[in-house]
Image (spheres, rainbow, N blue to C red):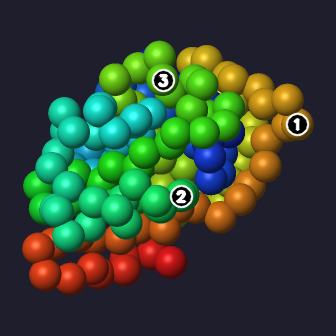
Amino acid sequence: MIYLAQTDTTIGFLSDSKEELATAKKRDQKQPFIICVSDFKKLKKLTRIPKKYKNLVRRSKKTTFIYPNNLAIRVINHGDHYKFLKKFDYLFSTSANKHKKDFDLQYAINSADIIIYPKNGFKLNNPSKIVKLNSHHLNYIRT
């Protein structure tokens, strides 16, 4: 099942199946996806936050962290996207466009099984920042 929704950052596809997302985006199945969770208890089930960065992770907004186990996870704990996401343990997330192509609303609607229309309509915003954490330093992948 692929959902089309306004995420906390941009318009995105969400699913509990990486394979379905890869097929919808027409991209390599081995390329990883961002995992979205609605709270820190769910995050703890997936990974361990290095002690040095616990406060940074808790205070960050619209930021995806790549943890030492190589999972890219973003906690969304506010807004309409949070209300949708809290119904699930976690969902894989990606932008709602073909791989390496610009956004096309008609393509996104045709590729989704369920469309969650936001009150104010879909808005293309900046994607989340991506920061890789390891035990010694931060590596900014996308700012």
Nearest the viewer among 65 and 13 is: 65
Q: Residues within 10 Å of mark 3 (few under 14, many from 20)?
A: some
First in residue order: circle 2 vs circle 3? 2
Report the front residue among 114 and 22: 114
- Expressed as whole percent of the image width and height from the top left, the position of residue 75 reads 43, 45
- Within-10-Å neighbours for mark 2: few <14, some 14–19, many 20+: some
- Above/below status of 68 relative to 120: below
Q: Horizontal and vertical percent for residue 54? A: 28, 60
Name the spot of residue 30 as percent of width and height, x first.
Answer: 21, 50
Decide if residue 51 is on the left or right side of residue 28: left
Observer-side mark, 1 or 3, equals: 3
Judging from the image, what secondary structure is the residue with disc 3 in?
Answer: loop
SS at mark 2 in the image? loop
The quadrant of the picture occupied by the N terminus is top left
Point out residue 27 in the picture as x, y percentages from the top left corner. Answer: 38, 50
Question: Earlier along the polypeptide chain: callout 1 or callout 2?
Answer: 2
CA distance for labels 1 and 3: 21 Å
The residue that mark 2 highlights is 61
Q: Secondary structure at mark 1?
A: loop
For residue 3, above or below residue 74: above
Q: CA distance from mark 1 to mark 2?
A: 21 Å
Left or right: where does residue 99 sit relative to residue 79?
Answer: left
Q: What residue lies at 85% left-to-right and 29% top-to-bottom?
A: 119
For residue 127, what is the image quadrant? Answer: bottom right
Q: Which residue is mark 1?
A: 120
What residue sits right under mark 3 in the picture?
86
